Amino acid sequence: MPVNVKVNSPKVTYGGDFIKAKYNYESSTATQHPDGRITINPYTLEMDVTTAAKVPRTGLMMAGWGGNNGTTFTGMCLANKHKLTWHSKRGEHKADFLGSVSMIGTFPVGLNEDGEEVFAPVRHMLPMLDPTKMEIDGWDISSMNLYDGLKRAAVFDWELQEKLRPHMEQLKPRKAVFFQDFVAANQADRVDNVITGTKYEQMEKLRADIRDFKTKKNLDKIIILWVGNTERFSEVVPGLNDTWANLEKSMKASAHEVSPSTVYAAAAILEGCAYINGSPQNTFVPGILELAEKRRIMICGDDLKTGQTKLKSVLMDYLVGAGLKPESIVSYNHLGNNDGKNLSAPQTFRSKEISKRGVVDDMVASNKELFAAGTGPQKPDHLVVIKYVPYVGDSKRAMDEYTSAIAMGGLNTMVIHNTCEDSLLAAPIMLDLVLFMELFQRMDVKVNDEKIHFEMGQLLGYWMKAPLHTMTNSLFRQRSCIENLVRAALSLPANNHLFLTKSPITNVVETLQNGVTNGVHKAVREPSVLKNGNILRNILPSTNGVHSIN
Ligand SMILES: NC(=O)c1ccc[n+]([C@@H]2O[C@H](COP(=O)([O-])OP(=O)(O)OC[C@H]3O[C@@H](n4cnc5c(N)ncnc54)[C@H](O)[C@@H]3O)[C@@H](O)[C@H]2O)c1
Ligand SMILES: O=P([O-])([O-])O[C@@H]1[C@@H](O)[C@H](O)[C@@H](O)[C@H](O)[C@@H]1O
């Protein structure tokens, strides 16, 4: 997609193939002393951030392609590619990407001459993959073509389903790796499209599929996304899956505890493909983590953060950040799609319960004042309930109750009812994960020529309930993380939101016209003064893109 945001700085070079930026990474370490004192030690690292400017021909392969999320995502991309419109009782609709930060989001990039904030579309900050140009393929245990799968999902309006038929009924999922024991028994009735052989042979078949897709579509890179059923957790057993070597042996022996999703992850990494886990199970057993680390392949998980849990990561941030003490959180929802059907089994529900409950842990841990020993509960009562009600289909009904202690013995209870088509929240999030993963794969960050390896759980945590290897679940800190990495690639400092001065131009003109008294600039003059930009040009040609104040 065209990029129409440009940084005017000698520290950023826009070459044909690369965007090169010098970036000062400002951070700090902190020491907690036994007596409660904390010492903060700031530091600065000079970084070289290089972003490949050409977006490679990219393909996406989904495990679970024929499901509600997979068909909805594919339909959304194709409807936008073909600029489809359709009608519902609410009138005419046009295809869009609502819910996608990469396609719809903006970042603040500075003040204009009137002192107002300017917001740039995220997709115009750095070259990003155009989702309408992305090739899509995948696997499913159900052989149903993508149009029939779209109808089975019953997420889109009928007219849109029919308009997508010519674009989707030729799309057929590849044969899948499947072991019944990892999902609910009620999934057996959709299994008619699976590979056989040892688990290792099945992995090799997946690898062949990846190579086949890459060759047939003349792709430069492929990203793999799991939106298959939620699996039960695999047991992590020394000698079985604790190292890559042991996991490889276990697959050759078709060891029972090797899950389908772990087999897909191994195939992806061995083929050099980034892997994203959209579900809550522990696909990334230590053997997979070791393989990804050794091969330097980006992996990310776990479990898309879409609605009820996303709101929880906002409310917890607000409550704890405001010094209010959440003491009871009850999250109930019922849904009637196949995901809900699969989650009706205790072992698969347990995977989801872990990811949905864990989202509050970092915010509880962030305030020892609130949850100090001896001041009552050390963490909120937190209950997650999911029920399967076929009637509602993909339209998930979520009901939440948050009760917090407020000042002087008071209580505050918030009750929320939240209804949505779960897959229409998930599809744009899947898109963001793929687009930002693809972008971050093109970014190279070095300190003194030593490459920094991204922790994708931290960078893509905004879209995950249980981000891998990270401690942050606060939604706005997570969004700020993405914003500031994009800013770093353009040599822009992390956004401090301080607005200590309207702008250097304001102060310079103000100073020049009214003098500086005791080194303090007077209150900002009306922005009209600034419209006559030539004041600055005549008096203070900018050097190195920075206006100096005499
Ligand atoms: N808002 C959301 O929809 C949302 C949010 C967070 C997480 N998720 C997770 O995303 C996943 C997909 O959700 P969904 O609503 O599309 O569910 P779904 O059941 O409609 O789709 C899952 C698909 O995976 C297929 N499948 C199962 N095992 C497979 C295997 N081993 N290989 C290939 N395909 C396999 C199934 O046949 C099905 O078509 C679920 O795990 C769900 O928990 C969904
Ligand atoms: O909205 P959210 O909590 O992020 O995520 C959803 C859950 O609320 C729902 O219970 C579950 O079935 C979906 O797979 C998804 O996980």
Image (tube, rainbow, N blue to C red):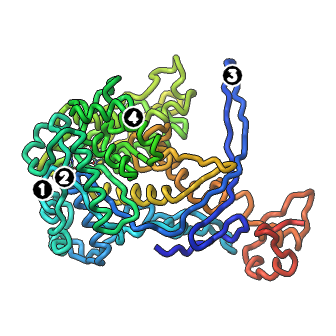
Mark 3 closeness class: few <14, some 14–19, many ≥20 residues within 10 Å: few
Evaluate whether residue 1 shows in this view. Answer: yes
SS under mark 1:
loop
Which callout, 3 or 2, points to the residue nearer the camera? 2
Residue toward you, 357 or 74: 74
Residue 358, labelled with which disc?
Answer: 4
Counting from the top left corner in percent of width and height, residue 520 is at 86, 58
Residue toward you, 432 or 20: 20
Which residue is disc 2 drawn over? 140
Q: Give, as a three-letter code, the residue at label 1.
A: Ser
SS under mark 2:
loop
Which residue is disc 1 drawn over? 143
Counting from the top left corner in percent of width and height, residue 73 is at 28, 61
Horizontal side of residue 544 vs 318, given as left or right = right
Q: Quadrant of residue 217?
A: bottom left
Question: Is the Cβ of the residue at disc 3 closer than 8 Å to that at disc 4?
Answer: no
Distance CA(mark 1)–CA(mark 4): 35 Å
Nearer-N-terminus badge (3/2)? 3
Which residue is disc 3 drawn over? 33
Which callout, 4 or 2, points to the residue nearer the camera? 2
Q: Give, as a three-letter code, the residue at label 3.
A: His
Residue toward you, 128 or 109: 128
Distance CA(mark 1)–CA(mark 3): 61 Å
Which callout, 1 or 4, points to the residue nearer the camera? 1
Distance CA(mark 1)–CA(mark 2): 7 Å
Identify the residue shown where x is 29% and y is 56%.
210
Ligand 1 closer than 8 Å to the CB at disc 2?
Answer: yes
Above or below 15: residue 73: above
Ligand 2 closer than 8 Å to the CB at disc 3?
Answer: no
Question: Is the Cβ of the residue at disc 1 closer than 8 Å to that at disc 2?
Answer: yes
Distance CA(mark 3)–CA(mark 2): 54 Å
Counting from the top left corner in percent of width and height, residue 302 is at 37, 42
